[in-house]
Amino acid sequence: MKTQIIEENALEEAGEIIRNGGLAAFPTETVYGLGANAFDEEAVKKIFAAKGRPSDNPLIVHIADKNDIARLAHDISDDARRLIEAFMPGPFTIILKKNDIIPKAVSAGLDTVGIRFPSNKTAQSFIRIAGVPVAAPSANLSGKPSPTSAKHVIADMDGRIDAIINGGECSVGVESTIVDASGDVPVLLRPGGVTIDEIREVVPKTRIDSHVLMSVCEGEQPRCPGMKYKHYAPNAEVIVVEGEKEPVQKRIKELLSENCKKTTGVLTMYGSVYDSAVMIDAGASNKEYALRLFKALREFDELGVEVVFAEFCERDGYGLAVKNRLYKSAGYNIIHV
Ligand code: TXA
Ligand code: MG
């Protein structure tokens, strides 16, 4: 299959691909998505094949009009309505009880569905032009860091999908915040572009799922099926070194000399003070870190880095989202100093 690159002013072609049961990757404010008609079970199955995604991992349904929610879901609580009002459109996904119109392939057999209304204008136009809700996971190969530019999508998906809409770089850089509002108490399943503090301003009783910062044990069934799979893993081994500036820098210097036979890299938030490693700047805030993280992990791979030491300290509301992605990309290999 030849993958077509579609510019933002030619979305009609992308809409047609979706209506014809094909796959088109599209930009959102968080990461690029890999879209298919959410009502077309056969089209949705192609997403799983293109990504190499396990079929028990459900997809988020993307809309460009809040009125669509009533068609897709039922039993929407007052708390859920408040969250929808506050955070949609935006980097936020709400899990609700699904209506039968959503095929099983989308929900992976669950009785709920994740719904997201992106704020990115190209994403909105694309969904409107397609004329149907668009089921989409992140547009990376399963297990790899999520794509934050069209270039990343091409690297993973060229020849596997019909088209990619080129919408430049994403502005958030990590995926949407997921809140399960299908039960009595909303639960944060994945931290992302909307912070937990912002959510608790709207619904103070919102809980944080225990798996946000912990790995899933063998045989355990997490509420968010995606939590049990390997995630965001570059080819390089990633080790998180977490703490304040001086002890982190001291420990990384020791680690670099212990690993001097390997090609090493440092993802730095405290400054480029190491002389024998490939360095990528993660920015001075966790918000910037979120924006740069996935891109940096891909860059280390391109540069042939074998071991990455990632400096980290939770600094602001985005800290939880960065930490969740970093811990996963490191396979929970974390050094606290
Ligand atoms: O920002 C985003 O959310 C991006 C863009 C493209 O919208 N999408 C994205 O999708 O990150 P994906 O499939 O890579 O991650 C969605 C996560 C998965 O871990 C999945 O298990 C979980 O959401 N999920 C989807 N539907 C769910 C449901 N009904 N209940 C619990 N978890 C669900
Ligand atoms: Mg993903």
Image (cartoon, rainbow, N blue to C red):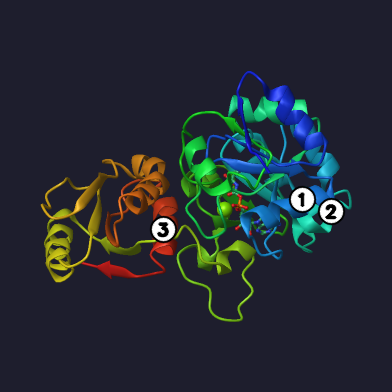
Q: Alpha-carbon distance for marks 2 and 3?
A: 32 Å
Residue in front for this viewpoint, 78 or 18: 18
Q: Quick one: which residue is furthest to the front in this view? A: 2
Q: Alpha-carbon distance for marks 1 and 2?
A: 9 Å
Secondary structure under tag 2 reads loop
> In the image, what residue type sits under mark 3?
Pro
For disc 1, the marked residue is 44
For disc 3, the marked residue is 234
Mark 1 vs 2: CB contact within 8 A: yes
Q: Residue at x 76, y 25 (%)?
A: 129
Lateral position of residue 220 relative to residue 317, left or right: right
> In the image, what residue type sits under mark 1?
Val
Q: In which image quadrant can residue 284 be found?
A: top left
Q: Residue at x 67, y 28 (%)?
A: 124
Q: Is residue 275 visible?
A: yes
Residue 5, percent from left and from top: 60, 31
Residue 165, percent from left and from top: 61, 31
